[in-house]
Image (cartoon, helix red, strand yellow):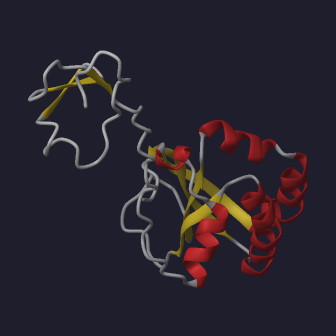
């Protein structure tokens, strides 16, 4: 019986808090049992840490567009950081050559972590920089301004630019450069 000096401490088992041994109260890792002749400490087993459950994952809404986005922008902690965007207006003079330029530079762009988030053919400019002519408007996005600068300094990109961009484009206007929140 608990409380006799020559018996070892009793380990607390499920269901022992009530019953013949009396009530148990936990204090500082030991349990004092009342209702016995001489109370003896009861050693509590160490409590294992509760494993943290992984956060619930949203249901997969698989689509080709979402799969492409997830391939280009995998889920990373840095995904919640701002992204560097630049909006540019171009005067495209030769659409066929410009289309070839985009086809050749896009794989390099994606490999460098960049992408086009807006691409528009402009029919009429109602307001813009004075003297500016453009018929194409796009926003290009990179994780940082440094990544943006590194891509446009890449010798492979510059070779494509010299061969296809320069002869197909007249005016170039940087309309905006800013950081944007990443898509959730």
Image-quadrant location for residue 28: top left
**Between 129 and 122, the one nearer to me in the picture:** 122
**Where residue 133 sits in the image (x, y, percent)?**
54, 63
**Where residue 101 sits in the image (x, y, percent)?**
80, 69
Whether residue 159 is visible = yes
Tell me if 36 is positioned left or right of 76 in this view: left
**Between 143 and 122, the one nearer to me in the picture:** 143
Q: Residue furthest left?
A: 35
Q: How many marks?
A: 0
**Where residue 55 sits in the image (x, y, percent)?**
42, 57
Residue positioned 41% across, 63% down in the render: 56
Q: Quadrant of the N terminus?
A: top left
Residue positioned 67% across, 44% down in the render: 148
Q: Residue furthest bottom?
A: 63
Image-quadrant location for residue 117: bottom right
Tell me if 68 is positioned left or right of 184 in this view: right
Tell me if 176 is positioned left or right of 27 in this view: right
Residue positioned 67% across, 70% down in the render: 92
Taking 128 as reference, is 59 above or below it? below
Residue positioned 45% across, 52% down in the render: 130
Q: Quadrant of the C terminus?
A: bottom left
Q: Residue furthest top?
A: 5
Taking 49 as reference, is 55 above or below it? below
**Where residue 17 sits in the image (x, y, percent)?**
18, 41
Taking 146 as reference, is 80 above or below it? below
Whether residue 134 is visible = no
């Amino acid at each position: 019986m608990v409380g006799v000096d020559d018996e070892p401490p009793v380990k607390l088992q499920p269901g022992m808090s009530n019953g013949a041994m009396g009530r148990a109260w936990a204090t500082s890792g030991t349990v004092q049992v009342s209702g016995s002749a001489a109370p003896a400490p009861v050693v509590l087993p160490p409590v294992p840490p509760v494993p943290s459950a992984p956060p619930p994952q949203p249901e997969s809404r698989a689509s080709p567009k979402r799969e492409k986005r997830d391939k280009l922008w995998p889920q990373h902690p840095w995904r919640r950081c701002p992204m560097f965007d630049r909006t540019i207006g171009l005067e495209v003079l030769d659409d066929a050559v410009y289309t070839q330029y985009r086809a050749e530079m896009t794989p390099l762009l994606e490999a460098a972590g960049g992408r086009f988030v807006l691409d528009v053919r402009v029919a009429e400019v109602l307001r813009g920089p004075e003297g500016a002519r453009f018929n194409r408007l796009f926003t290009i996005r990179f994780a940082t301004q440094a990544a943006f600068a590194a891509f446009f300094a890449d010798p492979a990109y510059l070779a494509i630019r010299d061969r296809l961009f320069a002869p197909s484009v007249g005016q170039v206007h940087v309309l905006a450069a800013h950081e944007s929140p990443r898509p959730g």
